[in-house]
């Protein structure tokens, strides 16, 4: 397991490799000042040619700048023929930000079902 310390940073993440792929749990606040931390974690995911599961259920606040690393990672993954991100746990306000970024195909909320994130 690779992780950041949730007590000292605005956002935190924990990464675990499992049989079905690499799992990244993200929490805290995602905004301009913490975007580099998320970008670092997503770039680590791109090392593994496995399905990457990103769980945003621990995110307490997010803005466009804080979520841009997800959009950038989706574009890099498509360019490098990696599997798309499997996104879970994004609440309604975060899904609205994805709509503003115009890079994800995110269906309307449907009771917590998984959403595959891919560049449009």
Image (spheres, helix red, strand yellow):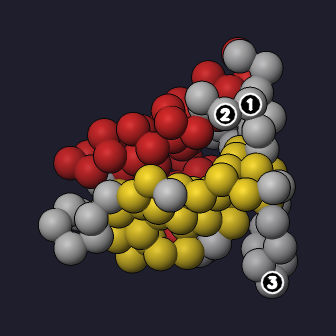
Percent across and percent down for residue 42 are 51, 40
Q: Residue furthest top?
A: 79
Q: How far apart are the alpha carbons under marks 3 and 2?
A: 29 Å
- Answer yes or no: do the residues labelled 1 and 3 have beta carbons within 8 Å? no
**Residue drawn 69% across the image and 66% down it:** 88
Q: Which residue is mark 3?
A: 111
Q: Is 101 placed left or right of 10 in the picture?
A: right
Q: Earlier in the sequence, mark 1 or mark 3?
A: 1
**Residue drawn 76% across the image and 39% down it:** 50
In terms of secondary structure, where does tag 1 sit?
loop
In terms of secondary structure, where does tag 3 sit?
loop
Q: Is 17 placed left or right of 37 in the picture?
A: right
Q: Can see residue 106?
A: no
Q: Which mark, residue 49?
A: 1
Q: Nearer the viewer, mark 1 or mark 3?
A: 1
Q: How far apart are the alpha carbons under marks 1 and 3?
A: 29 Å
Percent across and percent down for residue 7 are 21, 73
Q: Residue furthest bottom?
A: 111
Q: Earlier in the sequence, mark 3 or mark 2?
A: 2
- Answer yes or no: do the residues labelled 2 and 1 have beta carbons within 8 Å? yes
Q: Is 94 placed left or right of 40 in the picture?
A: right
Asked if 46 appears above or below 106 in the picture, the reply is above
Closer to the camera in the image, 17 or 119: 17
Q: Can see residue 110?
A: yes
Closer to the camera in the image, 30 or 83: 83
Density class for disc 2 (Cα within 10 Å; few <14, some 14-19, many ≥20) is some
Q: Which mark, residue 48?
A: 2
């Amino acid at each position: 397991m690779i992780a950041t310390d949730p007590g000292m940073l605005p956002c935190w993440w924990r990464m675990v490799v499992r049989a079905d792929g690499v799992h990244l749990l993200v929490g805290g606040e995602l905004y301009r000042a913490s975007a580099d931390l998320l970008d670092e974690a997503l770039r680590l995911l791109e090392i593994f040619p496995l399905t990457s599961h990103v769980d945003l259920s621990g995110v307490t606040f997010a803005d466009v700048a804080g979520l841009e690393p997800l959009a950038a990672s989706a574009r890099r993954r498509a360019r490098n023929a990696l599997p798309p991100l499997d996104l879970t746990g994004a609440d309604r306000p975060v899904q609205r930000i994805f709509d503003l970024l115009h890079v994800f195909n995110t269906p309307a909320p449907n009771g917590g079902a998984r959403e595959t994130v891919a560049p449009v």
